C-alpha cells in the first residue's frame, strides 16, 4: 500500500507513532517493502513501533523478546506496542519484566501497552502510554473513563475507535478530549470488513481527520 504509507509521511501530519506489523510480528525474514516504509517514517521523524502480541500474558517470554530483537535488527524500530496486554493486578510483575527486557533490547524504547480497557492503575508506571480503549464506536460513545486516569497527563493514554461514521468524527474526538486521551486513531472501517483488521487501512475520511486534529492529537 505505497499510497497509504506515503500519506503517513506527508509533511505536517500529526502522528505520534505508527505500528509496524509485518506478519503477526516481524515475520520470518526482513521485508524490503516494510523496510523502505519504516525508513521513510523514521527519516521524517516519526516513531515506528514493532507490534508484539502478548496474548494476554500467555505468550512465551523468550519468543516475545526474540521478536523484539528482530524488529530492532531488521527495521530499527523506536519501541513496541504490546497488543492484548494483560490488565489485571496479578500480571503486573510479568509485564514489568517484559518491559524492562524490551528497554534493554532498544535503548530509549517508546513502550505502549495495548490493554484496550482501563487496566489496574499500576500499569501506568510501566510504560510510556496505555491504550485504555480499543473497540467499536457503538461502545465508545457511551464509555466512561476510570477515575484514576485524572491523576495523569492525557499524553499517557491512547484510544482506538473503529466503525465511526464521518458524521460522528467530531463527536469521537470530543469524547477523547473529555476522557483525557491525547493519542487517538479513529476510523470508519469496522471489525467485519472482509476479515481485515479495522486498523490496517487508512480511514476513508483521512484528510478530514488530519485537518480536524491539526497539531493536537493523532496516533
Image (spheres, helix red, strand yellow):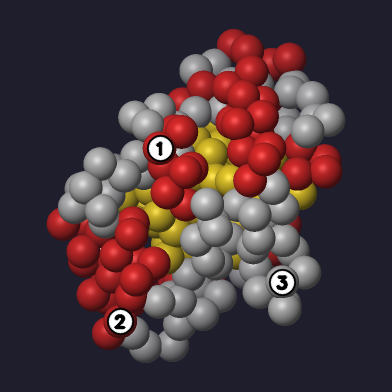
Q: Earlier in the sequence, mark 3 or mark 2?
A: 2
Q: Which numbered disc covers residue 33?
A: 2
**How far across and how far down the image is residue 72, in percent?**
30, 66
The residues tagged by marks 3 and 1 sit, at their Cα atoms, a distance apart of: 26 Å
Task: Tell which of 48 and 84 is nearer to you.
Answer: 48
Q: Residue under circle 3?
A: 193
Residue, far top: 151
Residue 13 in the figure: left or right of residue 184: left
The residues tagged by marks 2 and 1 sit, at their Cα atoms, a distance apart of: 28 Å
Q: Residue under circle 1?
A: 211
Please identify the quarter of the rendering in which residue 169 is found.
Answer: top right
**How far across and how far down the image is residue 91, in percent?**
71, 45
Residue 25 in view here: yes
The residues tagged by marks 3 and 2 sit, at their Cα atoms, a distance apart of: 24 Å
Task: Tell which of 79 and 167 is nearer to you.
Answer: 167
Whether residues under marks 2 and 1 lie with C-beta atoms below 8 angstroms apart, the answer is no
Residue 183 versus residue 11 in the image, above or below = above
Q: Nearer the viewer, mark 2 or mark 1?
A: 1
The residue drawn where x is 63% and y is 13% is 150
Residue, far bottom: 29
User: Neighbour class for label 3 at 10 Å: few (<14), some, many (≥20)?
Assistant: few
| Local SS, label 1 | helix
Q: Which quarter of the image is occupied by the N terminus? A: bottom left
Q: Earlier in the sequence, mark 2 or mark 1?
A: 2
Residue, far left: 43
User: Neighbour class for label 2 at 10 Å: few (<14), some, many (≥20)?
Assistant: few
Residue 184 versus residue 151 in the image, above or below = below
Residue 105 in view here: no
| Local SS, label 2 | helix
Amino acid at each position: 500500500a505505497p499510497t497509504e504509507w506515503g500519506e503517513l509521511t506527508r509533511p505536517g501530519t500529526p502522528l505520534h507513532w505508527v505500528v509496524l506489523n509485518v506478519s503477526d510480528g516481524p515475520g520470518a525474514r526482513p521485508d524490503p517493502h516494510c523496510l523502505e516504509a519504516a525508513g521513510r517514517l523514521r527519516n521524517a521523524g516519526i516513531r515506528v513501533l514493532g507490534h508484539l502480541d502478548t496474548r494476554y500474558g500467555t505468550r512465551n517470554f523468550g519468543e516475545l523478546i526474540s521478536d523484539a530483537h528482530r524488529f530492532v535488527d531488521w527495521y530499527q524500530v523506536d519501541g513496541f506496542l504490546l497488543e492484548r496486554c494483560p490488565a489485571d493486578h496479578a500480571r503486573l510483575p510479568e509485564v514489568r519484566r517484559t518491559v524492562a527486557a524490551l528497554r534493554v533490547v532498544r535503548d530509549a524504547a517508546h513502550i505502549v501497552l495495548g490493554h484496550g480497557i482501563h487496566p489496574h492503575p499500576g500499569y501506568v508506571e510501566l510504560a510510556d502510554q496505555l491504550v485504555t480503549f480499543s473497540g467499536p464506536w457503538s461502545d465508545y460513545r457511551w464509555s466512561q473513563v476510570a477515575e484514576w486516569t485524572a491523576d495523569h497527563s492525557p499524553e499517557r493514554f491512547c484510544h482506538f475507535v473503529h466503525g465511526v461514521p464521518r458524521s460522528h468524527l467530531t463527536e469521537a474526538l470530543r469524547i477523547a478530549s473529555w476522557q483525557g486521551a491525547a493519542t487517538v486513531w479513529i476510523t470508519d472501517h469496522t471489525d467485519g470488513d472482509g476479515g481485515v483488521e479495522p486498523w490496517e487501512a487508512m480511514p476513508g475520511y483521512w484528510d478530514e481527520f488530519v485537518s480536524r486534529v491539526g497539531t493536537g492529537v493523532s496516533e
